[in-house]
Image: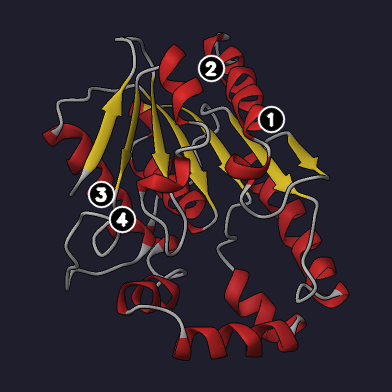
Amino acid sequence: MAYALDGPQKMPVVVLQSGLGDGRQTWRTVWPELTARHRVFALDRPGYGDSASTSAPRDPCHAARELHAALRDADVPPPYLLVGHSLGGLYQVAFARLYPQETAGLLLLDPTHPEHWATLQRDAPKTAALLSGLRSTVFTSTMRAEFDAQAQCLDALPPWPSTVPARLVFSGRFGPLETDEYQRTLARLRLDWQQRLGAPAETVSTSGHYLHRDAPERVVQALDHLLDAAAMPPRR
């Protein structure tokens, strides 16, 4: 897989994972500031950017294992400070559960909830119908494969490692198609994320879903807070 690696030889390495439909170029807004201070790795998953598509499974566990293999092949040793946006956040959670000893911390930007699609179909059917239409008409084959597999394999993963510090950053600006019904559903899923990870969360009221583009300074600030938490000795 194609990837970018830059920044000083410092540990832990910041590892970026993009969301549905995005390659590593989505991080260009925060890339200069991050690489000025950290060693940073970002890849194009199969079917995005400069990486060829694949017939391999597209579930979160496989995506996490692909990232792990890509880091190994690029000779980027752990520990890793994982950053994930949207569906990439769910993939990074899978990575931390598979490789807790290699994970220094986890920063999630508007992460997709493990029960996101099932919950939308039940509690926000208008939004679910809109997404179904987009899946059929706009999504690429890679996007459809990732969308369809977003909830697969998660029950087979080890439990969340409580020793891994995590932070959540949520967007607070919604578009005209994001109905009140959807926003109420999303608020419940966000609260559940906090409880699952035992993690602090903040909402950036001025940012849409792409926090790293709309509020790059807040993303960098959240990463600094996470680094501080990762440097603290674990609780006994």
- In this figure, which residue is indicated by the disc labeled 1? 218
Residue type pointed to by label 1: Arg
- In this figure, which residue is indicated by the disc labeled 2? 230
**At 30% across and 60% down in the image, what residue appears?**
48
Q: Earlier in the sequence, mark 2 or mark 3?
A: 3
Residue farthest left in this picture? 73
- In three-dimensional space, the C-alpha distance between marks 1 and 2, rounded to whole angstroms, equals 18 Å
Residue type pointed to by label 2: Ala
Residue 223 drawn above or below residue 99? above
Q: Secondary structure at mark 1?
A: helix
Nearer mark to the viewer, of 1 and 2: 1
Say which of 139 and 106 sits in front: 139
- In this figure, which residue is indicated by the disc labeled 4? 63
Residue 76 drawn above or below residue 45? above
- In three-dimensional space, the C-alpha distance between marks 1 and 3, rounded to whole angstroms, equals 29 Å
In this picture the colour scheme is secondary structure
